[in-house]
Image (cartoon, grey):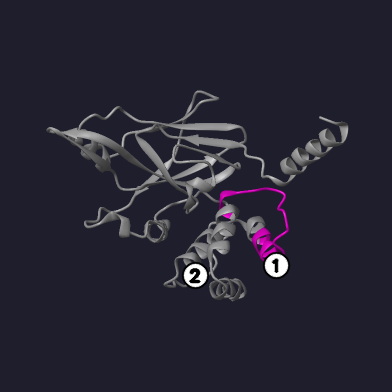
Amino acid sequence: MCLKSRIFVFFTVLCGSMTSPLMAATFEVPRSFEIMYVDLESAGRFGNDFKVDLVEGQHQIVVRFNKLLRSGGDTQVFQSEPIVLDLQFEKDTYLTLKAPYISTRKQAEANAKNPQFTIHDELSGKEIDYQHQILATKSGFQNTRDYVAEIERLTASNASYNTIPSTGPASAPATMSQDVALDMMKFWYNQSNDATRKDMRIWIADDSYEPAASSIQLDMSQFWFKKANQEDQKAFQKWLIE
């Protein structure tokens, strides 16, 4: 390869590394599970059905048990309901889901009702604390279900029951709406301290603004603001000044 070609290849690789986001963490599940969504987007955007690469911070990951099992003389596919996990990823983290071996439909049905698994940090050797929620069982043809909409409703309905320690100010006034994104923006803003609320207001006015410190509350506020349509974004900004 001539010198000119080598220089061109070098700069192509360099530019690619500069424009691509640096992934700081990995999440992996065994082959008896699948990763369905990461932050309400298809897992394929982040990696594949079994392993995804992520930036550090708070992420919502949806998984489900999915395996061929023997039942009598037949082999059938068993799928659990989607399980929504809320996980915090630190820099250079490699988390894996560890689950018991399941070989029968009876075992799978029992485990689907009360999932037994742990989240293990392969680098530190420690188990990771996590919270999970399970979508309600529905009958009928499953391919017609809008899982993303169901997950949004589940997250919104359970948000008021989650308590996040905070030394911040009293909650800002809240009014409930029928829109999930608007409700979630208000919820996470209410969970924030003064500094985080200020960062959020500045970021709304200038999305290139980079806060000095990150937090779960700020990450989730920004996430739901981006998910909201323009009407709800304006409604949220109006709510901030009321």
Is label 2 in a helix, a strand or a loop?
loop
Query: What residue is shown with label 1?
Result: 205
Q: Is residue 210 magenta?
A: yes
Q: Nearer the viewer, mark 2 or mark 1?
A: 1
Is label 1 in a helix, a strand or a loop?
helix
| Residue at x 85%, y 31% (from the top left corner) | 2
Query: What residue is shown with label 2?
Result: 174
Q: What is the quadrant of residue 168 in the picture? A: bottom right
| Residue at x 50%, y 46% (from the top left corner) | 44
Q: Amino acid at mark 1?
A: Ala
Q: Is residue 101 left or right of residue 207?
A: left
Question: Whole-percent x and y of residue 74?
Answer: 16, 35
Q: Amino acid at mark 2?
A: Ala
The answer for how far apart the CA atoms under marks 2 and 1 are is 21 Å
Question: Whole-percent x and y of residue 6?
Answer: 82, 33
Question: Whole-percent x and y of residue 241?
Answer: 62, 74
Q: Is residue 163 visible?
A: yes
| Residue at x 54%, y 24% (from the top left corner) | 124
Q: Quadrant of the N terminus?
A: top right
Categorize mark 1 by other alpha carbons within 10 Å: few (<14), some (14-19), many (20+): few
Q: Quadrant of the C terminus?
A: bottom right
**Range drawn in magenta:** 198-217
